[in-house]
Image (cartoon, rainbow, N blue to C red):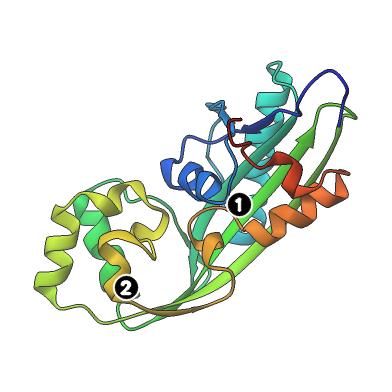
Amino acid sequence: MSGSGPLRFVLASASPTRLRVLRDAGFDPDVVVSGVSEEIETMQTAPAVVVLAERKARAVADAGAHGLILGCDSLLDLDGSSLGKPASPSEARAMWRRLSGRAAVLRTGHCLVDTRSGRWSSRLDSTLVRFATPRHEEIEAYVESGEPLSLAGAFSIDGLAAPFIEGIDGVPSNVLGVSLPLLRRMFEEAGVAITDLWRKAPN
């Protein structure tokens, strides 16, 4: 790490869930929202989330942020279709009707920019999610709660949707927006030990 002070860790994302996951894992990143377009046109889900993660991280770096800048983006891949945040309650209901009793893959793209060297890297992690078959009344109540409107694929593995998830195959934190094991490897590639970025307890 630089002798000029602690290495700054910046999250280039507005996601409160992603920030909570990082904080729960011992980090205290600064949040700088990129404000970039999330339009992906006809791209497939896997490359799309990586492109969006790169777009976010590099925009924040170009705007003058310094340190290790992490951009992430998540989409749910169902039969080759990308499901992001539902635009309305009716769209959330439609998503849950499609997901009920099915399995889909939550894909999260990660991009880490190191402004010390100007280097950047991007990676993808994917987690299979197996959905239960909630009753119509349960779907209605969940949508009316408002929770799914802020979530890719209209669900999360914690919160109110947790009882409707039968299981996952893969990294749990990836479903919440950032794969912590993958992030550790990306930090190592940048020459940084993940423990150096843990929040320091006050003396």
Identify residue type, mark 1.
Val
- On the image, the x and y values in percent for residue 197 come to 70, 40
Question: Of residues 164 and 191, which is closer to you in this image?
Answer: 191
The local crowd at label 1, few if under 14, some if 14 to 19, many if 20 or more residues have their Cα within 10 Å, is many
Q: Residue at x 63, y 60 (%)?
A: 46
Is 196 above or below relative to 85? above
Q: Residue furthest front?
A: 203
Is 35 above or below relative to 191? above
Residue under pointer 2: 98
Question: Of residues 134 and 3, which is closer to you in this image?
Answer: 3
How far is the residue under mark 2 from the one under mark 1? 21 Å
Q: Residue at x 63, y 57 (%)?
A: 180
The tag earlier along the polypeptide, 2 or 1, is 1
- On the image, the x and y values in percent for residue 154 come to 33, 58
User: Which mark is in front, 2 or 1?
Assistant: 1
Identify residue type, mark 2.
Arg
90 relative to 66 in the view: left or right: left
The quadrant the C terminus occupies is: top right
Q: Residue at x 74, y 48 (%)?
A: 194
Look at the image and tell me whether residue 94 can be seen. Answer: yes
Among the 4 quarters of the image, the one containing residue 181: bottom right
Q: Secondary structure at mark 2?
A: helix
Q: Residue at x 24, y 47 (%)?
A: 88
Among the 4 quarters of the image, the one containing residue 59: top right
22 relative to 196 in the view: left or right: left
Among the 4 quarters of the image, the one containing residue 28: top right
Q: Secondary structure at mark 1?
A: helix
**Residue 49: numbered disc:** 1
Look at the image and tell me whether residue 41 can be seen. Answer: no
